[in-house]
Amino acid sequence: MIKTIAKMSLAMTGAVLFSTSAFAQSSDWTRSVTNMFAAKQTYPSTAQMRGEEGTAKVKVYIGADGAVQKAEIVSGSGSAILDKEALSVPAKVGRVPAPPAGPTTLTVPMVWKLA
């Protein structure tokens, strides 16, 4: 019985270490993918001329192979033009590095602020 408990404890410790390592990879992956989206984000000239600013949160569905499957607005920016741009960004990227833990969703904030 004690040997079984010791083996279970060792197995659980290994799982926690693996989980921590996977979490670090996930954090790096998230940062990398968020940067990819930011690089494709533009500020529509019509929104700029109207003085529109805001932050839209977009939920992006990503397949195990890194393909962007769909995107939806979770929280709008207050501007239809900016929200339309926010929804177009994931399609512009198209594919990201494969998620470390398989298919996933990622909520990405997209900010537009006039200088």
Image (cartoon, rainbow, N blue to C red):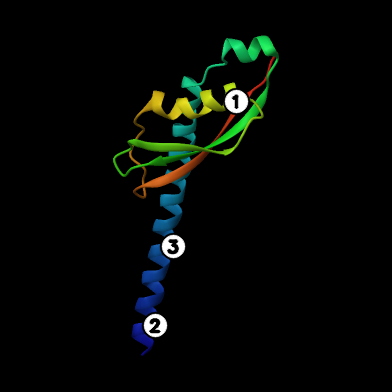
Q: Are marks 1 and 3 in contact (CB under 8 Å)?
A: no
Residue annotated with mark 2: 5
Tell me where residue 81 appears, x and y as whole percent.
Answer: 58, 21
Question: Disc 2 versus disc 3: distance between alpha carbons?
Answer: 16 Å
Q: What residue type is labelled 2?
A: Ile
Q: Identify residue type, mark 3.
A: Val
N-terminal-most mark, 1 or 3? 3
Find the distance from the CA under tag 1 to the CA under tag 3: 44 Å
Instruction: Pick the residue in front: 87 or 22.
Output: 87
Q: Which amino acid does label 1 sit on?
A: Ala
Q: Which of marks 2 and 3 is nearer the N terminus?
A: 2
Q: Nearer the viewer, residue 55 or 64?
A: 55
Mark 1 or 3: in front is: 1
Name which residue lies at 41% across and 75% down. Answer: 9
| Residue located 59% across and 10% down the image | 45
Question: How many discs appear?
Answer: 3
Neighbours of disc 3 within 10 Å: few (<14), some (14-19), many (20+)? few
| Furthest-front residue in this view | 80
- Residue 26 in view: yes
Residue 98 place in picture, x, y as percent: 33, 39
Secondary structure of residue under mark 1: helix
**Which residue does the numbered mark 1 point to in the structure image?**
80
Q: What element carries label 2?
A: helix
Q: Does residue 96 sit above or below 23 in this rendering?
A: above
Check disc 2: other Cα within 10 Å, few if <14, some if 14-19, many if 20+.
few
Which label sits on residue 16?
A: 3
Q: Look at the numbered disc 3 and give the secondary structure of its residue.
A: helix
